[in-house]
Every structure is written in structure tokens, then in C-alpha cells.
Image: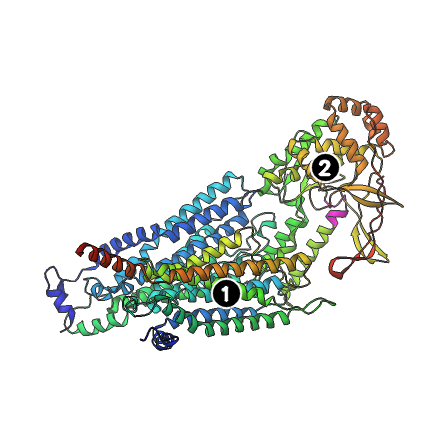
Amino acid sequence: MSPEPLVASAPGGLAAESRPDARRLCRVLLLAGRAEAGRMARNPLILASVAVVAVAIARGSRGQVPLWWGWDMTIGSWLLIPAGAVLVVAHLAAGRARRDGMSQLYESYPVPEAARAGGLLLGVAGPVALAAAVTAAATAWLDGQGALGAPSPVILLAGLLLVVLAGAVGVALARLLPHPVAGLLAVAVLGVIEVDLVVPEPVPVAFPARVGWLFPWTEPAGLGSLPGPSGLVPAAAHAAELAALAGLAGVAALWPGRRARTASRRGASKAPRRRAGGTAPAAALTLVGVGCLALAGWAAWAQLQPAPPSQLSRLASAITHPAGVERCVARGAVRYCAYPAFVPEIARWAVPVSGVLGRAPALRRTLVVRQVVDDSSWLILTIDGTNNLGASTATPPNAWGRQLARLARAIATFEDAETSDPRLIPGTSVPPVYTDLTWTEGSGLGTSELGLAVSTANWVTGLPTTVPIVSYSNSTGSGSVPVPCVAVGQAREAIALWLAAGATPAARAGFAAALAQGSGPTQVGRKWIATYYLNGSGPAPGPTVTAQGVALAGEMLRLPTAQVRAALSARWPGWLRSQATDAQLAAALRIPLPSVPPVSPPPSGPVPGPNGTVSIIGQNPPSPVCR
Amino acid sequence: VPVNAAGRPLLALAGPVARTMPWGPLLAGCAAGICVGLAMALFRGPTLSPPGIVLGVRASFVPVMTGLAFLLHDPHRQLTAALPVRAWLASAVRVALALPVLGATAGAEFVLAARALAADPRGPGAGPAALPWTALAAELAAWCLLALAAAALMARTRWHDVGGVVAALGALATLAVLALAPLHLLPTAFTDMTAAERQAWTLAWRLWLAVALLAAALAAWASRDPWLRTRVIRFRCRSAHAAG
């Protein structure tokens, strides 16, 4: 005698005819789902993974102003950790009955196996709620950090769908491979693939262009190097793919097993089909499965399509013609021009700029601080949807590829010109004061503020902020290098350093940190002099300043600001001439001119190193004196 | 089983242990590890840097370690606990039986990594590059022994039925902590190494060896007779005292 009639006739048992109807089944499903959701949400592995995500996002976002068009993808990347935990936990939960030897008892329950699987699938809502909470907390945290732009709701939703997919796959996998190692190995193998797709470097396996989007998650390199949301992330298609895959996994989890189908066939002649193994649920599941398959197919096709040329042209134009898309805001005698998403950052730039201008005598010129893109070298990788920095940036030999190559060349030419051509962008001060897309906060604030302060001070004093590229050929090699001019012995160099280093407390700390790195010899004309290398702002390499100028600026910083300002105001136009010397400035300030020890030229040619190695030290062309 | 005859218990145990050993997880883990190495060799792309190769090799260790975490899971533990041999002997036999599989897997992974390295286009004048076999083998040994130690510890708890899962996750968490600690246990550059980089590899493999030894000691300690037997003996002793 089969156990079914025994159970049905037992006290409290249900006869086959009085099996639960759809409403009762729903209630059972909800109760089971609630219980499983609570269990999963309390699981130490899931709680630990969510805590790791929270800590990682909090730590990773410190130090620079977050850009939402890169950070929404990064949140999804971090959600891979809870997703892996959910897969393992859901797999273990689905195998609990078998592991505890309770399968036969469960089969005697008056609900079908599908109801238990459905309960497990609903139980994934617990970890998803935790993931949603951590996503919301991350969003609030990043907004509190002054993140620029706005997060894409579709990308954030896709991150949560990642967790849903992991839960559904865990439940479905437990039906196919119930051994606990199956869930763990699935997470290990998928985790290895995802690390390859998300971590920028090193990348062991190189996927073809845009193929990374077919996997649960990928994070293209260079999203944060773009001047705003680019539309290069196929967010909707990817969310659809994740939803479709989760649906397919759910169908696989709910699909009537062999035992249910046998029971259904056996009971077909005796009782109406009410179990989940009946025809109607199977048909509904088939329909849902086909729908999900179609959606997944469309999503895959959509994600493999290259970005439209018009979109790429708009992006390239925003980089090469910033004046056309930027918004300019006037603050006093300064116009700040920034990409629309970066307008809130103007308040940060204004601090060092106004600090410099406030120390200088009144000027009759208007300064324009212009934001430019100077690091779009990863643009093609972003378009290809890959994070492999070593991937080939060759474009495909078709019309789309040729247009992409043209745009990439135009951007590269523009970025080269940014460093050397002082009149590149119309409507910008000459010499230009550029700032780029990155602005560090916290311990790096001094570097950022000093860089912009140095560029501003160079504009005030008439020193160049761009560096010409010089082709050279000598005994140690040949090539093209930027060769900055050096204001040897010129008073305006010390004035510029005094203006920049004293602009803000952070800039002063950044100045001290730059000097702590030590000086090096630079050939100016035929002489070798001691110089320091400072960071500027924007694309041009920082200025090379003489140790003499640095020492004099250091002495000036020790004097009361009013005293220095009064001495400078007395003959301001004269100090800006290249003929005004450090000695004259020191005399005007009534301080002795600091002495700087002479330097010897560095070794050139083959230099023996450790372990018998020999390194060749090249020699750049000598720098000219600033005029 | 004659306990006092040297070597006899091992031989007598080998057959039954081999039949009841969880070969499935072990072989699945090893196969997955080889597949990861194979994927790196086949889809390595035009430029695969030495750090990328090392990362790939380490990634292929993860599934192996995961499968190994189930090695000590014994569904018949209540029965085998009553065998007239020390409890650690059965675990030692399992490890001994798994060693050839692990050795073959490690060999296959290293061969695949060497093939990927050989195909790497190196600059003109660059010397021949070889994987740091010793260091990577020490790493694999340490990872595997960490998994075994975690599995042996879990087998002594009431969560022994999910011991493999917890052991694998525990071992991975321990590895993550070790990797994040400022011990520089995971060097990557191995071509045209400077003296400092060479020293970093030497230091790393020595540290991994120390981790392996510690994990082996922990696994041996955790594989001794279960506490249940000790409790029974104590109970009997107490009963005897009470009767006396």
C-alpha cells in the first residue's frame, strides 16, 4: 500500500479530494516564503556579506568626489558578494529536507513539492530586502559625500536583480544537483569569472567586445573618466536579461519533478488534477519559460549591439568642444565653466582660486577656469564594455569601426593639444587655467587645491600653464617630450609660489608635502640647477620650479601677508616682468636672499645597477628660460 | 582489524574508505579548477601579463580547495567512530587517497599556466620566464591544508552535516584575511624581477609554508578521537568510582 492513502486517512490528514485549493495554496506559499525569508535574512553568511559590502563602499568612496555614472555600476559589482552568499544559502535551504532525511515526511504534507520550492523562491525576498537596504544606504552615503550626477535607477535595480537571480539559481540548482558542493562550486566558478570581468587589472581571460554584458555583471573601465552619463551601459537590456534568467531559474525550480508527474498520472483516473504536477501549472510554467527565454534572447542581442554612431559623436564632441556643452558660472571676477554634472563642484574649485586672487593685488582681467577631459584613453574599452586595460583598442574593419577610429583620433589629438596649445579652446583665459574630472578629498585635498592654485597663480603672474612638446634626438635616444620652461631667478616665480602655497591651509600642506619629496637637477640652457616638480591642474604636466624660487617663497610665507602684499602692490606690473629678479624681491621685502647649493648633473648613459643589471638613463633636451 | 600490526590497519581501511570517500566533490572541484586554467589558456587574449597568469593560477586553486573541504565529511561517522582504530587514521587514509588526484590537478594547472606564459609576447631582449613553481605549490598546499583543518574542526561540531560548506567558506575567509593583511603573501610579478621582488616571493612561500604547517597541525589535532568517546570513558570512570 502506498503511503498516500495512509496519510490521507490518518487523523488530521487530508483526503485527495480535499486537497488545498488555489487560495489555500497561496496562503501556504506565503507562509513558507515568510519563514524562509526570515531564515535567509538571518543567515550569518548573508549578514556578513552585506556588512562587507557596506564597509567596502564606505571605504572605497573616500578620498575623491564620487561620480554617479560610474558608482552605480560599482554598487552592483559589490552586490556580487551578497549574490554569491544568497546562491549558497538558497541551495542549502533547498537541500535541507534531503540533508536532514525529511524528504518522505515532506512528501506526506498536503501541499505539493512546488509549493515548497515556491516558498524558497519567495524566501529570497529576505536577502533582497537586505540588499535593497544596503543599496539605499550606499546611495545616501555617496550623496552625503557630494557625489556628482544622479544614480541610474535601472542600474541599481539590476544590482538587486543580481541577488534575485542568485537565489533562484540556488533553488533550481538544488533540484538538479542537491549536494552542497554544487552551490559552492557554482559560486567559485562564477566568482572567478566575475572577478575577471569586474576587477580592472590583471585580467586573466579576455572576452570579446561587449560579451561581458552576457554574464551576470561587468563593469567597463573608464566610466569614471567620462564627463557625464554616457549611455554606453545597456542598463535596461541587462536588467531585462537578469530578470529573464531569474524567471528561467524559477521555472526550473518549480517544474514538476518525476515523482509529482507520476503521482499526477496515477491520480488522473481517480481524482481531478489539482496538484502542481498537473497540466495547467505545467502549461503556465512552459509559457513563462518561453517568455523568459525570448526576453533573455532579446536582451542578449541588444547588449551585443555596438553603440550608435550618433551617440559616440555626441560623446566625442563633448570632449573635443567643451565650450559647446559646458555651463559657465560667474563668481566675482572669475568664470567657472564646467560640464553640467560637475557644476556643484565649482564651489570646491572656488576655494583655492579665490584664495590666490585674494592675496594678489586687484586685477583688471577676468579669469576663466575651464574643465577639460584629459584621460579618455579608456574610452574605446568603455565602448567595448570591457575592463581589460590591456585589451586591444583596435577598431573593427567596418563603417562603424572606421567612424570610431576617427573619433578616437580626434580625441587623442585634442588631448595632446591641451597640454601644449594655450589658445586651444575659445573663450578660455590665456594662459588657460584648466581643471579635470578628478578632485580628491580628505588627505588628497592639498594636492588638488595646490594644483589649481598653482595654475591660477601662474595665470596671475603671466607664467605659462601649458608645455610645448619638443622632438629631440641625442646620444641616449630620441622622441618627443614635453619641455617646460623654467623661470630661473625671476621674481614672478616666487610670487606665484607664495600666492599658491598660501591660498588655503590644504594648499600649504600640499606644498610642504611636494617639497618633502626632494629636489632634482634640471638643465636650463647650459647650466644645471636644482628644481622641484609640482602638480598643476588639468592635463598639462606640473611646472618645474627652481629651488631658489621655492626657498624665497618659503621665506615670504613666514612674513605677514599684509607686508608682502604691500611690497608687491607698490610695483605690481614691474614684478610680473621676467627681468624682475629674486634678489630685487628679497630686497623689497627686506629679507636676505636664501642661498641654494649648486647641483651636479645626473649620470647619463649606461649605469650599473644591483645584481649586475645595467640601466640606460636618457637625457631630455634642456629647458628654456621662461620669457 | 588487528590494531597492533604495523601498517595493517592502513591497508585494511584503504578499501572501505576509498569506497565511502566523497569522490564527487573532490573530483568536481579538481575538474572545475582545471577548467578555470583551461579557460585562461584558451581565452587569454592578445596580451596576458604575468600578474594575470598568476591571478589565473590562484583562481584555479579556489575550486580545488572548495572540493577538498568535503573530503573529511563522513555520513557514516556514528558507525566508523566505533572502529577499533584511532579516528585520525581514517582521515589520514582519505588524505592519502586524495593526494594523487590533487597532485595531478596541480600538475595540469601548472602546465596550462606555463602554456599561457609561453604564448605571452615578451619584449625583445627579455629573458626566458618561468613560473615560480615552488611558491605556487606552497600556496596550493597551504590553501588545501587550511580547508582540511577547517573541515576537521567542523566535523567535531554539531554542524558536521554542513561541515564541507562551512569549512570551504571558512578557509576562503581565512585566505581573504591573510591576503588583506600586510604580509604581502600574494606577489604577482615574476618576470624580470628586481632583488626586492625576488625576496618578496621567497618570503611569501616561506610564510605559506608556515601557514601550511600550522594548518596541518590543526587538522591533526582536530582529527583525533571525537569528544563523544572521551565523554563515554569519563562517564564510565565516574560510574566505576561511584560503584566502588
**Image coords of residue A605 (percent x, y):** 83, 57
User: Quick check: is A10 in the magenta stretch?
Assistant: no
Front-lying residue, A4 or A216: A4
- Quick check: A246 left or right of B56? left
Of circles 2 and 1, the one toward us is 1
**Image coords of residue A571 (percent x, y):** 83, 24
Disc 2 marks a residue whose amino acid type is Val
Mark 1 highlights which residue? B141
- Quick check: A591 left or right of A155? right
Mark 2 highlights which residue? A454
Q: Which residues are magenta?
A: A417-425
Residue B147 falls in which quadrant of the image?
bottom left
Residue A366 falls in which quadrant of the image?
top right
Determine the chain carrying the residue at label 1: B
Is residue A386 something one can see in this rendering?
no
Disc 1 marks a residue whose amino acid type is Ala
Element at badge 2? Answer: helix
Mark 2 Cα shell of 10 Å, populated few (<14), some (14-19), many (≥20): many
User: Quick check: is A423 in the magenta stretch?
Assistant: yes
